[in-house]
Image (tube, coloured by chain):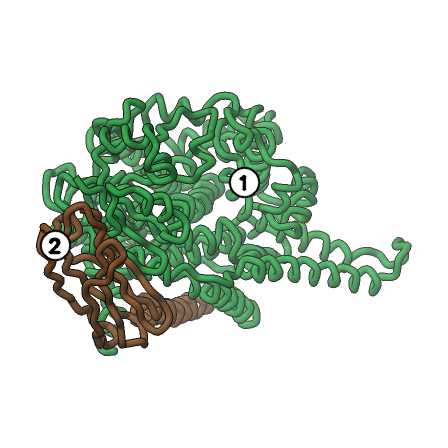
Chain colours: A brown, B green
């Protein structure tokens, strides 16, 4: 009988432990708890400049700028709730891109991030 | 929440189905279930299930069938059916039906103590694992890649990889001997049946379960080793204390679990189980035990080459020590052994081994080049053996000191069963020699990996020595002692407290203060993005030094073990004993150099994943690279055509 008690107790402790660890992992793996955001081109290989802001932070307001060789050509503000991604289309004729570096900067309350393409 | 509860239920059900039922059925089929205690059956069922499931999947793969839920359930059902048929056939034939569960149960107080120790063990390890439960470990990432190939393709994996050659091009696929199939089949089975995701708690939880079972295996093995001695229960409970809550986190325990050192962790379970069965076979002269022991050994060979190698040395040293102690009777005893070994059940298992090794699946490491790398004079400093201080640190000071005393006591321990003495001495001595003087044994294996195996035998030996000394102090004639007995007793208990504090202190220093979850999540998000944007002709290179969870990146692409290519640790590129390619290093460290340009041209690498806080500057200066993705701790650069 005592061996069986040991077995049942072991199984019970393991179930509790596994449940706790699974719950902990579920919380940890939720990227919306990490207060981060990412910036990337929708099509990284083409000449297109459409970009996306993926927001997993509590700051929802973002200011974006498009600069051609350090001259700001376009800018705007966008509100992105936590957990959402917003695509910002950017149309610049190919003739205006030639031999230029197009930088996309996005700023929220705390940080600025940049991506760019060299043409 | 409902989804979470149902997923947990499915996961637990899968664990019971895959990791207990097959083994339990085999124990029933052998007719040995009456001869094991419930706890022994519990641990044995788990160990056997791992091996049975491995062999079932090997059979499915060899039969050319797809490895999926249907085939796994079908083959499991056939196996369980055969076991039950054998069980009922054996029951009808059985003469010896009066033998019930082996005696030697614990008292209520002892059981409570055991339960408390198991609780403490699980609790301490849970506290440690909660900070590392999100999967980021490098080794685990590598293993889960192979497991995922089984799940996604339904085939047994081909362990091979491409590399960058000295001519700065990509080679053809070449075999890898480092991975052994038994490390992946059990995880694949659980993933296929339960549908659980790889980037989740599942791999660590399964390894955690294996680790807890190995602690219980030490407990039941020490019960068997000391069963003829006075205070045997105390010895086994103490062994549980020294193997469980003390030093619960250092390698090879919870650290190996979180690090994904799968083979070693399973090996640490199978070694004591095999020793238990061999012990029972020799002591009770039952060939059925020997057959099971050989089956476990075969399973070990399919799971972890290093554990198998260590086990062979343990067996050799045990035989040597036994022969030394009983050289006068060795011929007579050998005949007894032959009667056990040359029995139908044992020969059937040997036949099974031959069929599997030669016709079903040969473990990848059974080739001459892999054997050559493990045997011979140590080729590097890390394989030249540990110092005594290093070994003491690995084993735990308290355990090491007591184990050393145990060796001396065991040499003169006439009351102990001859096999128990030989096995315990063989286990401790073989691992000590392999760790301290590998050159004497012509071993060329990293010494710290070998030394990690000494933890469990030291725990058992230390428990033995502790109780023997305690007995001696209690029963010694006070008139013959120079010191008063209460003083000796109190000093001894202070020593006990010192040992316990040492073990718990070691736990506290191993606890993590920082977590890499945030950085790893960014790596996975970037990998997910890139995997959807690239084509089959794009080649990706990533950094291993500054990215968290980078070995898991390959699970997002599933384009080969070495995709993406990786800039490894910097010291590896300076290793004079191995001629390594430099492309993966220069393409990230010096992307504008001529050497790097040749590498980019030869390998066709056009995407680079790195940590912008460390490596973006050199790319920002090059106009041919675009920064196409940026997070806080990860960036992706594209080499525009």
Residue B573 in the image: above or below residue B98: above
Mark 2 falls within which chain? A
Residue B89 seen by the camera: no
Q: Considering depth in this image, is B332 or B49 the residue closer to the camera? A: B49
Q: Number of labelled discs? A: 2
Q: Residue at x 32, y 51 (%)?
A: B27
Mark 1 falls within which chain? B
Q: Which residue is mark 2?
A: A48
Residue A115 in the image: above or below residue B290: below
How far across and how far down the image is residue B75, in percent? 15, 49
How far across and how far down the image is residue A10, in percent? 42, 66
Decide: marks 1, 2 in contact (CB < 8 A)?
A: no
Quadrant location, the C terminus of chain B: top left
Left or right of residue B121: residue B530: left
How far separated are the C-alphas under marks 1 and 2? Answer: 57 Å
How far across and how far down the image is residue B155, in percent? 15, 42
Q: Quadrant of residue B204?
A: bottom left
Q: Which mark is residue B260?
A: none
Q: Residue furthest front?
A: A71
Q: Residue at x 45, y 32 (%)?
A: B312
Q: Considering depth in this image, is B115 or A3 the residue closer to the camera? A: B115
How far across and how far down the image is residue B160, in percent? 25, 33
Q: Considering the numbered disc 2 on the image, is that residue within a helix, a strand or a loop?
A: loop
Q: Residue at x 69, y 63 (%)?
A: B497
Left or right of residue B186: residue A85: left
Q: Which residue is mark 1?
A: B451
Quadrant location, the N terminus of chain B: bottom left
């Amino acid at each position: 009988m005592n061996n069986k008690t040991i077995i049942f107790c072991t199984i019970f402790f393991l179930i509790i432990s596994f449940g706790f660890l699974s719950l902990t992992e579920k919380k940890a793996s939720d990227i919306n708890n990490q207060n981060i955001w990412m910036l990337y081109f929708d099509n990284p290989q083409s000449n297109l400049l459409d970009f996306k802001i993926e927001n997993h932070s509590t700051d929802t307001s973002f200011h974006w700028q498009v600069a051609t060789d350090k001259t700001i050509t376009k800018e705007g503000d966008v509100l992105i709730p936590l957990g959402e991604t917003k695509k910002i289309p950017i149309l610049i004729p190919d003739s205006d891109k030639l031999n230029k570096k197009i930088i996309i900067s996005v700023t929220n309350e705390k940080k600025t991030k940049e991506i760019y393409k060299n043409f | 929440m409902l989804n979470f509860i149902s997923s947990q239920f499915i996961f637990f059900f899968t664990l019971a189905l895959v990791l207990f039922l097959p083994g339990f059925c085999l124990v029933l089929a052998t007719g040995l279930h009456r001869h094991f205690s419930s706890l022994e059956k519990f641990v044995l069922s788990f160990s056997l299930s791992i091996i049975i499931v491995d062999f079932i999947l090997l059979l499915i793969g060899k039969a050319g069938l797809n490895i999926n839920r249907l085939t796994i359930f079908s083959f499991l059902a056939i196996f369980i059916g055969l076991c039950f048929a054998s069980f009922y056939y054996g029951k009808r034939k059985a003469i010896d039906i009066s033998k019930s569960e082996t005696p030697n149960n614990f008292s209520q107080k002892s059981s409570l103590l055991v339960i408390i120790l198991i609780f403490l063990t699980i609790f301490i390890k849970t506290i440690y694992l909660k900070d590392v439960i999100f999967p980021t470990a490098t080794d685990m990432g590598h293993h889960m890649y192979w497991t995922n190939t089984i799940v996604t393709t339904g085939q047994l994996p081909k362990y091979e990889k491409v590399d960058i050659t000295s001519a700065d091009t990509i080679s053809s696929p070449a075999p890898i001997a480092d991975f052994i199939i038994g490390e992946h089949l059990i995880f694949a089975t659980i993933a296929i049946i339960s549908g659980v995701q790889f980037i989740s708690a599942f791999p660590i939880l399964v390894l955690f379960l294996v680790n807890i079972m190995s602690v219980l295996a030490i407990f039941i093995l020490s019960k068997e080793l000391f069963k003829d001695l006075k205070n045997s229960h105390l010895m086994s409970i103490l062994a549980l204390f020294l193997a469980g809550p003390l030093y619960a986190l250092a390698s090879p325990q919870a650290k190996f679990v979180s690090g994904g050192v799968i083979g070693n962790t399973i090996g640490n379970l199978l070694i004591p189980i095999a020793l238990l069965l061999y012990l029972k076979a020799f002591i009770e002269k039952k060939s059925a035990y020997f057959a099971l022991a050989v089956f476990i050994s075969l399973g070990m060979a399919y799971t972890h080459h290093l554990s198998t190698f260590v086990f062979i040395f343990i067996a050799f040293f045990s035989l040597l020590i036994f022969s030394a102690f009983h050289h006068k009777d060795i011929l007579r005893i050998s005949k007894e052994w032959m009667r056990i070994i040359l029995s139908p059940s044992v020969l059937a298992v040997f036949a099974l081994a031959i069929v599997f090794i030669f016709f079903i699946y040969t473990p990848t490491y059974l080739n001459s080049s892999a054997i050559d790398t493990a045997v011979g004079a140590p080729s590097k400093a890390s394989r030249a053996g540990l110092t005594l201080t290093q070994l003491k640190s690995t084993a735990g000071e308290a355990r090491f000191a007591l184990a050393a005393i145990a060796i001396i006591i065991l040499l003169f321990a006439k009351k102990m069963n001859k096999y128990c003495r030989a096995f315990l001495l063989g286990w401790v001595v073989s691992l000590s020699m392999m760790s301290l003087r590998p050159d004497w044994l012509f071993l060329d294996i990293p010494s710290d990996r070998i030394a990690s195996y000494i933890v469990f035998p030291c725990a058992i030996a230390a428990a033995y020595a502790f109780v023997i000394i305690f007995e001696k102090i209690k029963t010694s004639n006070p008139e013959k002692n120079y010191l008063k007995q209460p003083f000796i007793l109190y000093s001894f208990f202070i020593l006990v407290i010192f040992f316990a504090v040492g073990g718990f202190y070691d736990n506290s220093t191993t606890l993590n203060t920082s977590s890499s979850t945030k950085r790893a999540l960014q790596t996975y998000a970037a990998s997910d993005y890139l995997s959807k944007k690239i084509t089959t002709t794009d080649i990706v290179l990533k950094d291993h030094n500054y990215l968290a969870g980078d070995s898991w990146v390959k699970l997002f692409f599933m384009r080969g073990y070495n995709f993406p290519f990786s800039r490894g640790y910097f010291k590896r590129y300076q290793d004079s004993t191995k001629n390594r390619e430099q492309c993966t290093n220069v393409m990230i460290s010096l992307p504008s150099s001529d050497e790097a340009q040749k590498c980019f041209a030869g390998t066709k690498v056009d995407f680079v994943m790195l940590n912008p806080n460390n490596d973006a500057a050199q790319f920002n200066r090059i106009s041919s690279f675009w920064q196409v993705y940026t997070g806080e701790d990860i960036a992706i650069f594209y080499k525009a055509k």
